[in-house]
């Protein structure tokens, strides 16, 4: 079953199936900016960058969107919580609205049009 959104994933298999797999497939040339900020305090670690990653959306599948064949930049923030040697939780904020704008999709204009808002 195709899963067009990221949402909540459970465990490493859910992460690979619902997020990592579709993303890696759709952005085969992705590259991470290793100058990202890293903050750690106790059992928490956070990293992010604006932008943090670049890649060409050359294959469909990510979020159910067709490929735009444009080089996109990703603004991402990742926060992890660990217990001992295990990562127990991971929260990720991805600026998907910005990515859609780079693809030529104005999500807010589409919403206004769908709602019939002419303001």
Image: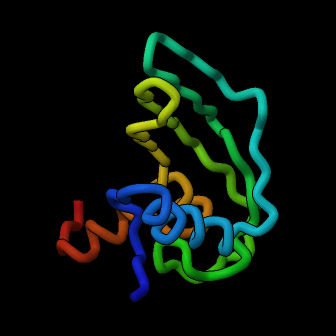
Residue at screen point 48% across, 48% down: 95
Residue at screen point 46% across, 32% down: 80
Q: Is residue 39 left or right of residue 113?
A: right
* Position in image of residue 33 (x %, y %): 77, 38
Q: What colour-coding does the image apply?
A: rainbow
Q: Where 61 falls versus 40 (above or below)?
A: below
Relative to the observer, which residue lies in front, 86 or 59? 86
Q: Where 70 falls versus 82 (above or below)?
A: below
Residue at screen point 23% across, 59% down: 119
Q: Quadrant of residue 21?
A: bottom right
Residue at screen point 57% across, 72% down: 22
* Position in image of residue 4 (x %, y %): 42, 76
Relative to the observer, which residue lies in front, 71 or 113? 71
Q: Quadrant of residue 25?
A: bottom right
Location of the N terminus by quadrant is bottom left
How many discs mark residues in the rendered view?
Answer: 0
Q: In this view, does 91 lie to the left or right of 30?
A: left
Q: In which quarter of the image is residue 8?
A: bottom left
């Amino acid at each position: 079953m195709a899963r067009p959104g990221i949402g909540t994933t459970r465990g490493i298999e859910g992460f690979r199936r619902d997020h990592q797999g579709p993303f890696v497939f759709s952005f085969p040339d992705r590259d991470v900016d290793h100058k990202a900020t890293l903050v750690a305090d106790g059992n928490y670690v956070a990293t992010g960058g604006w932008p943090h990653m670049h890649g060409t959306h050359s294959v469909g599948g990510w979020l159910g969107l067709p490929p735009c064949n444009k080089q996109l930049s990703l603004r991402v923030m990742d926060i992890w919580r660990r217990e001992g040697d295990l990562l127990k939780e991971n929260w990720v904020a991805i600026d998907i609205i910005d990515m859609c704008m780079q693809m030529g999709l104005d999500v807010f204009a589409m919403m206004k049009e769908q709602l019939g808002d002419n303001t």
